[in-house]
Amino acid sequence: MAETVIMVTGSTGLVGHGIKLALEEDKKPNEKWIFLSSKDADLRDREATELLFEKYKPTHVVHLAARVGGLFNNMEHNCYFYRVNCQINDVVLDLCKEYKVQKVVSCLSTCIFPDKTTYPIDETMVHNGPPHLSNYGYSFAKRMIDVVNRVYNQQHGCHFTSIIPCNVFGPHDNFKLKEGHVLPGLIHKAYLAERDDQPFVIWGTGKPLRQFIYSVDLGRLIIWVLREYPEIEPIILAVDEEDEISISDAGELVVKAFGYQGEIVHDISKSDGQFKKTASNAKLRKYLPDFKFTPTKQAIEETVDWFKINYETARK
Ligand code: NAP
Ligand code: GDP
């Protein structure tokens, strides 16, 4: 059987580790996985990136690398998020065409959907209207991946596709308070509240709703998309709509996982961001009706345990 060489960009982050953990239970002998970080090359640099394609000759690429941040990081750096992600995507996807990569799976996100929309959101709605102002730059850069996938398919016959995950969390997340997403932020804050006997502070009203997917589940689904998903059109990788929870509920699950019994307060001077971005996973369910997501409570407990054990070295 011919060897498949799968090059994963941005694999030192949250989602990359999710794929590595999922592969531990699902290795195939004909697959060789190459995991890259920014130390291998800055993917904005075409020459340096081309050396990687020359060296590894990938038959498949999972393109995760991106400048990623939570609500507050996006609000401050909209222009930077736009530029850096457009630059990375242009270099990586064009080299995939040049090097005749057979299949590419890139990452969008449910936060890139139109802000004013009907719910649930589905895959046909990516370009229907402007995204939320808070992450305008990141969202438009990400939406362009879908455009790139379609035009490279039309003009060059490339098989480039994309996935649209909801909010992801798990081991190796970015736990920096100002930069990261809500769950790693809440986990870090609960750790400090417990350790320093301080109140646990949830930013905003706690009312916004989110679907959270565990990075290991996302890893399993990305491996399936790479091996089996036949379409160019994106596919939403999200938990079921009934598993959407409020930010306050997420905070409750985090403090329970720590056994924290202190005061819980809301800092309503901080933005709530998008109220919700409820996405339908009907397309995923059509392909994989029996896929079992790890219960959010269990996944949060596992992530909290990981954070406690790896506190010294975690990104924080
Ligand atoms: P992450 O933990 O911040 O990891 C980002 C990865 O990208 C790291 O490996 C980083 O390498 C690499 N990277 C960044 N800039 C680079 C550059 N200029 N050149 C080369 N590598 C670069 O992010 P993540 O959460 O795993 O996100 C992975 C993908 O999932 C992204 O495309 C993101 O848009 C998508 N996604 C994430 C979420 C979420 O909730 N986190 C939700 C939906 C979609 P270094 O570590 O070496 O810097
Ligand atoms: P989003 O899902 O793309 O909006 O990004 P986030 O993962 O950053 O989630 C933002 C939501 O969580 C907003 O409603 C914030 O007010 C709320 N939130 C509560 N505490 C935190 C925190 O510690 N960090 C972050 N990033 N958001 C928080």
Image (spheres, rainbow, N blue to C red):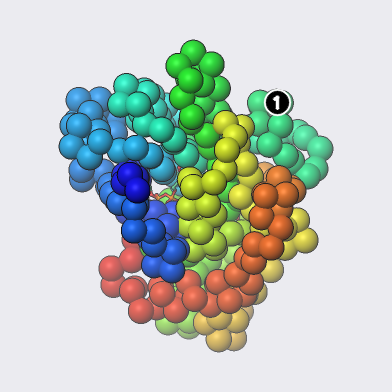
The kind of secondary structure element at disc 1 is loop
Task: Give the image quarter of residue 38.
Answer: top left
Task: Give the image quarter of residue 129.
Answer: top right
**Residue 286 position in % (x across, y down):** 72, 49
Q: Is residue 40 visible?
A: yes
What amino acid type is highlighted by mark number 1? Gly
Image: 259 above or below 39 = below
Residue at point 62% right, 75% down? 297
**Residue 48 position in % (x across, y down):** 19, 31
**Residue 244 position in % (x across, y down):** 72, 59
Mark 1, residues whose alpha carbon is within 10 Å: few (<14), some, or many (≥20)?
A: few
Please indicate whether residue 124 sits to the left or right of residue 296 in the image: right
Image: 314 above or below 240 = below
Q: Quadrant of the C terminus?
A: bottom left
Question: Looking at the image, how many numbered discs can be counted on the residues?
Answer: 1
Residue at point 48% right, 72% down? 303
Please indicate whether residue 204 sits to the left or right of residue 243 in the image: left
Q: Which residue is mark 1?
A: 129
Image: 112 above or below 245 = above
Q: Nearer the viewer, residue 29 or 311?
A: 29
